[in-house]
Image (cartoon, rainbow, N blue to C red):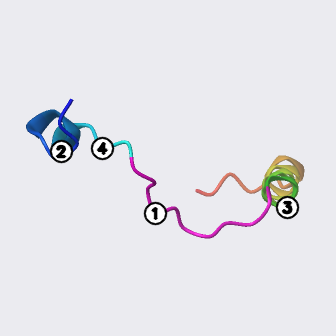
Amino acid sequence: MDPNGPMAKRFPLGARFRPARLPLPDRVRSLSEIAERAASGSDLGL
């Protein structure tokens, strides 16, 4: 297969840019804290 052909341009296998993120345990902890606050509050957001 031609590496510069139309199929290679349509389905590139090169590395993609990915934005920097916090480690997964930190993201899960943050989400858990948000869920706990939402569950413990009586405010329905109305």
Q: Residue at x 89, y 51 (%)?
A: 40
Q: Residue at x 78, y 58 (%)?
A: 27
* Residue type pointed to by label 2: Lys
Asked whether the residues under the numbered discs 2 and 4 touch, taking CB atoms below 8 Å apart as contact, a structural biologist would say: yes
The number of numbered discs placed on residues in the rendered structure image is: 4
Q: Which residues are magenta?
A: 14-23
* Residue type pointed to by label 1: Phe
Residue assigned mark 1 = 17
* Foreground disc of the pair 2, 3: 2
Asked whether the residues under the numbered discs 1 and 4 touch, taking CB atoms below 8 Å apart as contact, a structural biologist would say: no
Residue assigned mark 2 = 9
Residue assigned mark 3 = 26
Instruction: Provide residue 36's location: percent of width, then percent of height.
Output: 88, 51
Say which label, 3 or 4, has the lower sequence index: 4
- Whether residue 12 sits left or right of residue 44 in the image: it is left
Front residue of this view, candidates 7 and 21: 7
Instruction: Provide residue 3's location: percent of width, then percent of height.
Output: 23, 42
* Foreground disc of the pair 2, 1: 2
25, above or below 6, in the image: below
5, above or below 23, in the image: above
Label 2 vs label 4: CA separation? 6 Å
Residue assigned mark 4 = 12
